[in-house]
Image: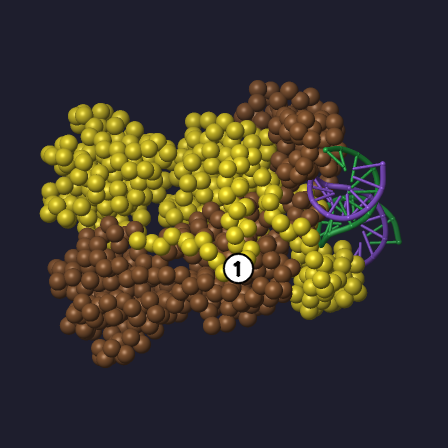
Chain colours: A brown, B yellow, C green, D purple
Amino acid sequence: MLSRCQPVLPYSADSRIQATFEQHSGNPTPRPMGTTRINDRVVSDPQASPPRMSDVARIAGVSKMTVSRVLAGHSVAPATRERVQQAIDKLGYVADAAAGALSSGRSEFVAVLVPSLASSNFSDTVRGLSATLEPHGLQLLIGDTDYDLVREERLVRSMLRYQPRCIALTGSQHTEGTRQLLQRSRIPVVEMWDLPANPIDMAVGFSNARAAREMVRYLKERGYRKIGFLAGASDLDRRGLERLKGYQQEMKAQGLGEPRVIRFGESPITMSHGAPALDALLEQWPDTDAVMCVSDMSAFGAIMQCHRRGLSVPADIAVAGFGNFEVAVCCHPTITTVSVDAYGIGSRTGKLLLSSLGSVSAQAVPQRRKLTIDYTVIARESA
Amino acid sequence: MLSRCQPVLPYSADSRIQATFEQHSGNPTPRPMGTTRINDRVVSDPQASPPRMSDVARIAGVSKMTVSRVLAGHSVAPATRERVQQAIDKLGYVADAAAGALSSGRSEFVAVLVPSLASSNFSDTVRGLSATLEPHGLQLLIGDTDYDLVREERLVRSMLRYQPRCIALTGSQHTEGTRQLLQRSRIPVVEMWDLPANPIDMAVGFSNARAAREMVRYLKERGYRKIGFLAGASDLDRRGLERLKGYQQEMKAQGLGEPRVIRFGESPITMSHGAPALDALLEQWPDTDAVMCVSDMSAFGAIMQCHRRGLSVPADIAVAGFGNFEVAVCCHPTITTVSVDAYGIGSRTGKLLLSSLGSVSAQAVPQRRKLTIDYTVIARESA
DNA sequence: TTGAAAGCGCTACCAG
DNA sequence: CTGGTAGCGCTTTCAA
């Protein structure tokens, strides 16, 4: 297999790259030897492997430690620092983070798991996290669970191998295995987008059920009484289920009659599920005067289907969404929805994680922390 | 509106973190975790530290090497393997990937850079990559360049610290620094979503200009003559610019008169840019009979604006998009567009990367360095 | 302010 | 099939 002294694999593209970009004819052997075109450096190294900290140290005429200090921003004499920096630039040195992590016992990774990257609210959350953590030199390990708790466990296990400093999950539902892995890892954990009754560690989110109840009340105030709800058919989207539950509770609380629930389509329910779900609803309860949707995506699909059926929104039927996605603003009619600060969930999760990293040794800090995120019903044209 | 983050968290550590953040944001030298104040790892319980491979070895009564072999799936006597596995389960042992990477000289990382995670085509590409690479134990390092080439360079530098096995970028436009970093790193590089004239290494994509030209021809065949184009105002979205260029070329080639171009909104142009851009177009060229948009997002916004203006699509004005996003299928009318297999770009990039990693086996797998992805004009209701 | 030595946890290598 | 040894590239610790 691979020889330690001739690390072929990581540089297997070498000859090809040289053939393309360098003037001299490429060496056909897979050995990454030969002259490198790294500036004017003559290869005095026994190997043409990427430069190491010791190379920098030698060029700058200092010890490895001094190079390390320059890189870490510790105090070094200005003149020395200058020489080291020049050597770094000259060699194009890039420090090996894995070695650093191993040596210091502390990685720069933060693991994040979201149900879907394609969903703009979760990608916004990731952006918020990233923007908060990046300035601290932390690197996100992003995982897409695809709304699958077993896959989530597999991803958690896989990510734990990189010794992340902390981890952010979505939702409060996890396998027992996931919980165990997390507990044993003893790193700070944040659950996002929900407010679990028993959080693993910390939580940043809101009550999806309450938000849905607020929307029911809003619709009632606007005079709607025969209110339906379009949800996904599967139980994978727990937050969607919470919204459904909130709808059912509030329908009862407000004395608005039997809930009219259509469950259609695999989670996450998307634009394309809106149309058939609306059809099903109107077939079963033709006198429905308002429809709540588990997300703006399906609300949009439903509205488009109303157009196709010649129904006017909201005159003939009102439609409300959830999430305040861009489509809610651009759609004609604009969509009444519940606005949630997805980016803020990410950035506040990031801050929470940062603060928990700063208090690793502190036994004084309360262990359980829940951060509630605001949401608002946004009244627009559709309801 | 969305509520901004309230910076005040009920924990003492927070204000310090805030201060640290500010300090960093003005620092011209990219520094990793320089100001973290965790000065001493409090070595509390020795039992608190996670189990190591030597612990597993001790419990199982074997050497570390045997544990390592079990983990790597190398040949080990079944009975021994069983004992080791039990020890692993008992301790909840998770191998340290950083140590493994350092020791073997080979990481399991693949770096990916996309302009935006929120854009469904790029998140689909990431999904395709992930699905292809994950079974091989490779872990994605995902970066969001935000359509910013300088940020891309910073991200590349940062990711190179983790010694990724290979890297996938979006587009053919990069800073000189990025190109240098990549060439020096000597790892396989794939540029996606475009077909660069001078690829850094490999490429998987298609000609955005040609695709746009095909759409012009399609519109001409359908009888449209006064065709406008809605593009973003900034030059950040190079693929969008390519489409614009293709439109201009084909308008000329087909003798369809002066191009009617509206450039509006920061890139990436999104749903909300469609409406004002359409207004601008119709103000300047009121007799326009068809509009090509740089993406389905703006096409959707434009169509909604047509509804608001009482214009029928396509009877009064045709609208075409690009990308075949879900909104194109769900919108009423459904949107004529150019379909690109975004997921396929990811999975084929993944395969290309895998094969270039596997090229250790000497015998040159004659890999095509440029892989062309198919696209199709999809005729729907809107044009 | 700088340097030398001692590992971090794991795997390659070669003996047994 | 299994084990001992010797590092991987870096940071910690302590001494100069």
**Residue A3 pos. (x, y %):** 73, 40
Position of A230 with respect to C9 (left or right) is left
**Residue A241 pos. (x, y %):** 37, 70
Q: Tell me which corner region of the image, top left, top right, bottom left or bottom right, holds residue A155.
A: bottom right
The residue tagged 1 is B11
What residue sits 24% from the left and 74% below the top? A260
Near mark 1 (Cα within 10 A), the count class, few <14, some 14-19 or many ≥20, is some
Position of A2 with respect to A300 (left or right) is right
Residue A286 showing in the rendered view: no
Name the subunit of mark 1: B
Give the camera-side residue of A224 and B53. A224
Q: Quadrant of the C terminus of chain B?
A: top left
Q: Tell me which corner region of the image, top left, top right, bottom left or bottom right, holds residue A66.
A: top right
What residue sits 70% from the left and 24% below the top? A43
User: As shown in the figure, which amino acid type bears the numbered disc 1?
Assistant: Tyr
**Residue A314 pos. (x, y %):** 16, 61
**Residue A208 pos. (x, y %):** 37, 67
A38 lies above or below A217: above
Q: Tell me which corner region of the image, top left, top right, bottom left or bottom right, holds residue B94.
A: bottom right
A75 lies above or below B257: below
Secondary structure of the residue carrying tag 1 is: loop
